[in-house]
Amino acid sequence: MYHTRFHAQQTPDKPAYIMARSGNVITFGQLEQRVNRCSQYFKDIGLQPKDRIAILMENNDRFFEIVTAATVAGLHYAAISTHFKLSEIEYIINDCDAQILITSDTMGDVAAELVNMTPNVKHRLMVGVNSPGYQSYEETVNTYPAVPIPECIEGRDMLYSSGTTGRPKGVVSTIPDLPFGEILSTGMAVIDICGFSPETVYLSPAPLYHAAPLRFCLWVLRTGGTVIVMTHFDAEESLALIEKHRVTHCQWVPTMFIRMLKLPDDIRLKYDVASLKIAIHAAAPCPVEVKEKMIEWWGQILFEYYSGTEANTFTAIFSDEWLIHRGSVGKCQKGTLHIIDDDHNEVPLGTAGYIYTEGGDTFEYYKDPQKTADSLSKQGWNTIGDIGYLDEEGYLYLTDRKANMIISGGVNIYPQEAENQLALHSKVYDVAVFGVPNQEFGEEVKAVVQAMNPDDTGLDLERELIDYCRERLSHIKCPRTIDFKEELPRTPSGKLLKRILKDEYWKENCS
């Protein structure tokens, strides 16, 4: 059985997770008691398997118990980004048909407004200091006995797409229900490939409401490992935690690698990272030069995968393979990949097209049959909207997302290429590349840069960066102009909210 309950019975005093900033330790025994009380509450208020709940919380020491209790009770839970706007949060809670909302006092102001905006929510709990319209989570669940409820099906996440390219949609797995203590095949593949075990010490620097951090942490817990939970990513703090806790496994996005690599050498190299066995990364294409530098620094321990919230496919590649197939995200471990064009015809090897999966896991978008239908090819294969190509050995290379593609004068341009180059410049802290209106060509390439030193911004740096890009890429792929901002909009997990930037330029053009 893969479940925290087993480890609570075998090693009740072992840390299940540690909150990095506070140092608060929750053992497997404590976690089991908390999970039992919370799941007893769910059962008492009448929730049935496959009913839905919404969770709106930052990383705190109650997150895992609530999610695990929902899983024990067979519920579907929507974990919502605390950085979404109020209207987005309201939409998700109402759209997912949540019967209960669990939030925290950190979200107090937003939570107060949600009371009248989410009339179908029957129960509201708040972790920490209570607020009008909410019951205290701690006081409520602590009245229930710490004994297990009868076993039923495994509950599941019902996570919403990030909304970076439009309104978020709930992703619903259509895989048959699993009995208590079993894990979906994709999770089992990750556990096997990464070697998660009771000896695992896993550092999680990202928000738990995102798919990868949440799922990977839960897989570690269910195999008896210990999770170190950061409240938010900080480059130096991450390195210090690896040394302090002798971390064996960790997960990152490329932006985090870049932040760590740009630390001064006297800071970056003073921490001992020799305990690391596997450094997992995904979520966005990693610039080749960045990954090369990380392998040079940490050794051949980097493990990259490609998947999505929809979990329709899963590719994997370790460092030794990657050094032969630089830039690849690996071979498909689940299903068969097909690269097709706009007419759903397969394209030749080495040619970029839309990535579709045959025979992988299936999914649908909740209450959106049109979007579900749009995710399917005429052959019945599914996609999450990414673009890439396959080489002769079946290794996948990501190019960009369909929604990010720039069409300038009839030519398809993938802005990820220019972003990858500019991100490596010593004077660039962050960068976004996207298309803006051009009367002659339809669109032109624009970059928005957050400079390492705000005093450097201006025409000289703009020209320097454009020239730098043109030395490495064809001119058509490079920005024609560059604007500078104090900060670029990113989610706490590092995902660039390019839509927000693009909207500014397209609205200006339409006004």
Image: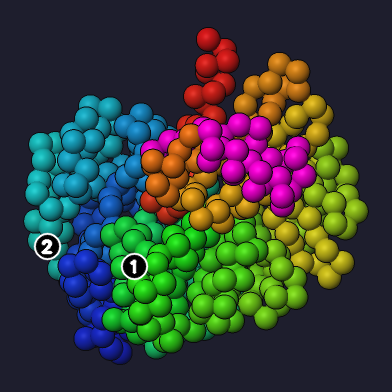
- Give residue 463's quadrant in the image: top right
Residue pictured at 51% horizontal, 55% vertical: 426
Mark 2, residue position: 142
Residue farthest front in this picture:
460
Q: Is residue 166 left or right of residue 65?
A: right
Which is nearer the eye, 367 or 467? 467
| Residue 442 x/y as whole percent | 72, 22
Residue pictured at 31% horizontal, 68% vertical: 237
What span is colored magenta in the figure?
459-488
Query: Mark 2 or mark 1: which comes first in sequence?
Result: 2
Q: Is residue 381 magenta?
A: no
Residue pictured at 80% horizontal, 27% vertical: 409
Residue farthest top in this picture:
511
| Residue 232 x/y as whole percent | 32, 58
Q: Is residue 385 left or right of residue 146?
A: right
SS of the residue under disc 2: loop
Q: Is residue 134 left or right of residue 332?
A: left
Q: Is residue 484 magenta?
A: yes
Mark 1, residue position: 236
SS of the residue under disc 1: helix
Tell me which colouring the rendered structure shows. Answer: rainbow
| Residue 353 x/y as whole percent | 79, 47
Judge whether residue 284 can be spotted in this image.
no
Distance CA(mark 2)–CA(mark 1): 38 Å
Up-down relation of residue 443 to residue 509 (above or below): below
Residue pictured at 66% horizontal, 44% vertical: 467
